[in-house]
Amino acid sequence: MASSDTIFGRILRGEIPCQEVYADDHCLAFRDVNPQAPVHVLVIPREPIPQLAEATSDHQALLGHLLLVAARVARQEGLESWRTVINSGTEAGQTVFHLHLHVIGGRPMAWPPG
Ligand code: 5GP
């Protein structure tokens, strides 16, 4: 499946709604439909990269931008401390094959993750 055909591709195309918290020319950030903490936002590139494992050096600036947007969103949500997660691959827990960063915060976090 091309990642443009995932649920996130449909969100980017405006075919299904989302609770947007930030958008620019390169990415979109919106609330996770099944939040794991008081704040749980997903940051996704507009370019449909399926997973981090498929990113290349061509994506270097975009990947840096996504991290900076994650921090911007966390601050916007009032977080001083948060976790940024990228699941890459099924065994890591990735379920939507359109690269995304989770920004999770607002409660104490355990380590290691499950
Ligand atoms: P993954 O498990 O791939 O790292 O994360 C996918 C995330 O997307 C999950 O946390 C899941 O709750 C979220 N998600 C799946 N479908 C939708 C949707 O239609 N809308 C929103 N806002 N989040 C979704």
Image (tube, helix red, strand yellow):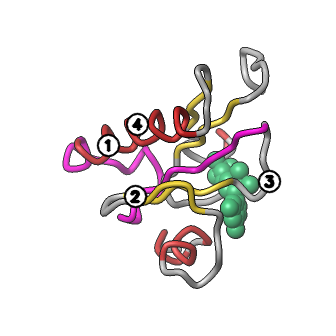
Q: Amino acid at mark 4?
A: Leu
Instruction: Give the magenta range.
Output: 38-60
Q: Report the Cα–Cα distance between label 3 and label 1.
A: 25 Å
Label ID, residue 67: 4
Q: Going from the N terminus, do you reach mark 2 or mark 4 first? A: 2
Cβ–Cβ below 8 Å for labels 3 and 1? no
**Which residue does the numbered mark 3 point to in the structure image?**
34
Q: Going from the N terminus, do you reach mark 3 or mark 4 first? A: 3
Q: Going from the N terminus, do you reach mark 3 or mark 1 first? A: 3
Q: Report the Cα–Cα distance between label 1 and label 2.
A: 9 Å
Q: Report the Cα–Cα distance between label 1 and label 4.
A: 5 Å
- Whether disc 3's CB lies below 8 Å from ligand 1 is answered yes
Please identify the residue farthest to the left as the structure is shown.
Answer: 58
Residue 78 sits in which quadrant? top right
Up/down of 40 relative to 109, above or below: below
Label ID, residue 27: 2
Q: Report the Cα–Cα distance between label 2 and label 4.
A: 11 Å
- Whether disc 2's CB lies below 8 Å from ligand 1 is answered no
Residue 92 sits in which quadrant? top right
Task: Give the residue drawn at x 40%, y 36%.
Answer: 67
Percent of width and height locating residue 32: 70, 54
Q: Name the quarter showing ligand 1.
A: bottom right
**Which residue does the numbered mark 1 point to in the structure image?**
65
Secondary structure type for disc 4: helix
- Whether disc 1's CB lies below 8 Å from ligand 1 is answered no
Task: Give the residue drawn at x 53%, y 44%.
Answer: 101
Task: Give the residue drawn at x 58%, y 46%.
Answer: 89
Q: Report the Cα–Cα distance between label 2 and label 3.
A: 20 Å
Secondary structure type for disc 3: loop
